[in-house]
Image (spheres, rainbow, N blue to C red):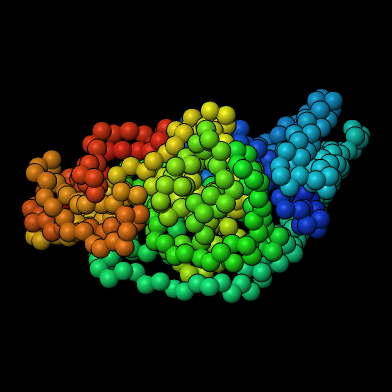
Amino acid sequence: MTRRTAVASGILASAAALATSEALSALLNLRESPVLAVGQSVIRLTPGPIAEAIIGVVGHADKPMAVGSVVVAILLLGALVGRWWAPRRLWALITVASLVGLASAAVLGRPYGSIKGVFACVAAGVVVLAVVRLLQPDDPDVPADTARRSFLRTAALVGVVTVIAGGAGQVLASRHRRRQSVERARAALRLPTRKVAAPAGADLGVPGQAPWLSTNRDFYRIDTSLSPPLIDPTQWSLRIHGMVDKEITITYQDLLDRGLKDAWITICCVSNPVGGELIGNTVWGGVPIKGILEEAGIKDGADALLSTSDDGWTCGTPLDALTGGRDALLALTMNGEPLPIPHGFPVRQVVPGLYGYVSATKWVTDWEVTRFADVQAYWTQRGWGERGPVKTESRIDVPRDGDSVKAGSTTVAGVAWAQNVGVKGVEIRIDGGEWQKATIGAAPNKDTWVQWTAEWSAASGDHTIEARATNAAGEPQTEDRADVLPDGATGFPGISVTVA
């Protein structure tokens, strides 16, 4: 057997193993397949600066890329197994055993880990060995032409079975009983909500400008979960413990009984670069966090709330941001409907004025009242700042960077934000010249972004346009450029345009 054929047999064997593990995961009704469990481990072990660089390059494609990298790594290791099968059998067996062990450890290290997941890992390892053994028979007396034809026939058969198994796994996964059950439960909810219209004058209606209201479908999503947790609201609960006078547990119905409050709140990701789009604005419906914490009673010395998601992700939030009068909510609705599953259904946190990594825990199930000196949450362990206040920022939406525009009166428009403080004004300047005021839209409170627009008498040539916002405290957006690490990017957003 040639080296190329041996490598091909290993790749085909690892593909068959992947298909087998996915099909078994669906048949066994696992909440996460081994591939997803390994992918989550890769995300968890990735250093903060590397994770930030990946998000900066690929944005919303970070999750498919994480899964894809796991698949590619398995296929490459499969190629190695195929290459070693005849000359170095022991090394091939050790490689397969190591893969099974690492995958099993990843499965058991997840909140949803079970022996059924380990079984899927072991079965995948058995398939690798069986397929390689089938494609590389130990029979040196077989003529080369006969061996080649036999390999091609067997490889074709294995390929067909792999496609069928993989396809069946995808079909079964799409009909996952748990997901169907949760989706039905979400659809059946009749929450005391209503569609809230955008305030008059908030949306300036400039073509190409981001709408003042971000739809649920278009709202940005950044989290570490490759597969959103599936939680039936009747089974959801929130345990509140730690430095409290009394430990309490709250159910979904308890939240409904308290009554829901609507609040327009813009939330922003700390990974948002200057002029970036990892930000959204909508109306959230939920229960004020302050009252719940007051019911539990906070002991002296506590300054942090460590919240934990159903999938194990943790978040540290300053207690004063939750008890000091902000519209900090345990949100149940988003834009007048139950939270979408990817955005935290059934319950998530929303806290104005803080970046999401220190405030916006999705699928939240546990609160520990504690001290920053005693705990470190997921992203602070990876180099991000401890408290994460949102900075005063602005963005240019119209024109786009690199656009060609006509000479004469040209509209420049965008959005600006300074949550928990409010935006007082926005200015633009052309080619580093004098700042000129823009018109800003209305805002219902200090926790939302504002739209802005300005008219520019564009002359022929190449030009740069910059913007800056000033918050309600009179503090202008800083010109100093800073990266998103450790606590959010700064600098003026700027674009280049050509005027014809």
Q: Closer to the camera, 443 or 78? A: 443
Q: How many marks?
A: 0
Q: On the picture, is 77 further left or further right than 466? A: right
Q: Is residue 306 above or below residue 255?
A: above
Question: Where residue 124 sits in the image (x, y, percent)?
Answer: 80, 44
Q: Closer to the camera, 87 or 450? A: 450
Q: Is residue 227 above or below residue 137?
A: below
Q: Quadrant of the C terminus?
A: bottom left
Question: Where residue 268 sits in the image (x, y, percent)?
Answer: 41, 49
Q: On the picture, is 211 further left or further right than 437? A: right
Q: Quadrant of residue 203?
A: bottom left
Q: Is residue 387 above or below residue 361?
A: above
Q: Closer to the camera, 330 or 269? A: 330
Which residue occupies 29% across, 45% down?
393
Q: Quadrant of residue 385?
A: top left
Which residue occupies 8% across, 56% down?
457
Question: Where residue 28 sits in the image (x, y, percent)?
Answer: 81, 55
Q: Closer to the camera, 51 or 496? A: 51
Q: Is residue 304 visible?
A: yes
Which residue occupies 8% across, 44% down?
434
Which residue occupies 62% across, 62% down?
254
Q: Quadrant of residue 479?
A: top left
Question: Where residue 49 sits in the image (x, y, percent)?
Answer: 48, 31
Q: Quadrant of the N terminus?
A: top right
